[in-house]
Amino acid sequence: MEQNAKPNKLPLLGMVLTTTLVLGGLLALLWWSEHRSEVYARRAMAAAGQQDWAAAEAWGQKAETAGAADVLNDIAAQKADALFESGDYAAARALYGELGNARQIMACAYRQAEAALAAGDLIAARDGFLSAAGYEDALQRADRCRYALAEAALAAGDQQAAFDGFMALGDFEDAPERARALAVALTGEADEEDALLSAQGYTPEVLSLQEQLQQKRDGLLSRRLAAGHAHALLLVEDGTVRAAGDNGSGQCDVSDWKNVVAVAAGYAHSLGLTGDGRVLAAGNDEYGQCDVSDWQDVVRIFCGPFDSYGITRDGTMLHAGFRDLSALAGWTGIQRVSAGDGVMFALRENGSLLSSLPDQAQSWQDALDLAAAGHAPVGLKRDGTLLSAGRDLSAWTDVVAIDSSASLLVGLRLDGTLLVEPLLMVDEGLLTALRAEETVVGMSVAGTYALLLHEDGTLTAPGASFDLSPLTAPQS
């Protein structure tokens, strides 16, 4: 019986080995199914490290097919950085554009502008630095290019072009003095102010209209109004503030504010500017939009949905809130800001336009107000007409103020009526109601309503869904 038992051990050992191999194979397959995306990703990044972009992209595609995330984006970012370091700024800029990296797009535009300047192409250099406004000293270098272009026009004997160039630079260096001297030379007028007006082509009729427009603007009371998403503020003549509407985040808790000279409202927060340049805040502070207590010497305030902006006396822009505006630290000489759909616009004191997105800056002249129409800016000129990138507003004339929301662009005319352009689908009844308004002397637009103040002191708010009576209730 002992001799018969020994041979039976061999089949048992085979079964154990076979089972072990099968289990090992299954475990290996399981491990591979769980980790192959990591293996492919490592191979992709190794190939990218060698700048073998074809292999990197092939392995990256396999990795993402196997379930890995963002491998191709990481490869594209590495490739863009490598192109930037090699000096191929055009190709790097295109890749950064696909990745949505606005900061690096501006860096490429800056380097391209430097190359254009080195080649003597002042126009390309000016446009390149403008498109990179906010990156390092791009704005200042753009102004230097514009100054050099004015000097070049003067050297070529084109005094009018030189005058226009120096005039467009505002108070940059000695541009005002040079513009005045050229205006006198061009017109023969002894009085410099008369010469400046004549050199710009202003006729007596145009000047008369501009005077009327400016008088109306000087009398507007828009700084007393602020329309939020579902709340509204009214600045009373004694410097206190009243609020109406939703107070779910405390945005209407403004009863203790004193010495206020202007108000602004976001989606669910409120700002007040005091006479001594401080800023008060109430409401939602989820993104730090109410962290403004240390702001000083502020002369204007503005709100985005989840952001707060202040402009100081020297034209510096302050910011608190959701957006990352670190790339805009180089913006100077700011007089107006407006937040659009994923973009921030600013109007400089010389009338030119800056944008947080590349290639949207404009060498506008004579612009004094700004509104965002979705992705595009709209500027108001002194003569009551509009500057617009991508929207035909040529029929808008005699405009004294503009404001906008994501849904509406509204213009206030000299006669107190409103012009309205829908930016999104809105109720036709709202448009009709807005266009029927008269004697308006102040306005603030938010969402799908406008808060309007009239010559007789009454308030209306076409499109609003809340009670305005707390704004106009008799004082106790």
Image (cartoon, helix red, strand yellow):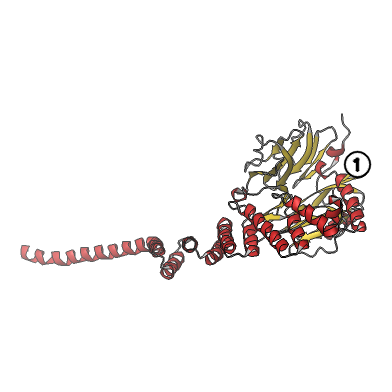
For label 1, count other residues whose C-alpha is less than 10 Å away and answer few (under 14), some (14-19) or many (20+): few
Tell which of 163 and 456 is nearer to you.
Answer: 163
x then y, percent, for residue 332: 67, 48
x then y, percent, for residue 245: 78, 42
Examine the rendered structure and indicate whether residue 454 appears above or below residue 98: above
Tally the numbered discs: 1
Mark 1 lies on residue: 457
Residue 472 location, quadrant: top right
Examine the rendered structure and indicate whether residue 360 appears above or below residue 213: below
Tell which of 218 and 314 is nearer to you.
Answer: 314
Tell which of 279 and 457 is nearer to you.
Answer: 279
Helix, strand or loop at label 1? It is loop
Tell whether 21 sits left or right of 181: left
x then y, percent, for residue 424: 75, 60
Tell whether 248 sits left or right of 72: right
**Outermost top residue:** 476
Query: Residue placed at 32% from the left, 61% from the top?
Result: 27
Query: Residue placed at 57% from the left, 55% from the top?
Result: 103
On the question of residue 425 being in view, the answer is no
x then y, percent, for residue 51: 41, 65
On the question of residue 450 being in view, the answer is yes
Residue 188 location, quadrant: bottom right
Examine the rendered structure and indicate whether residue 185 appears above or below residue 57: above
In the rendered image, which quarter contains the C terminus?
top right
Residue 256 location, quadrant: top right
Q: Amino acid at mark 1?
A: Gly
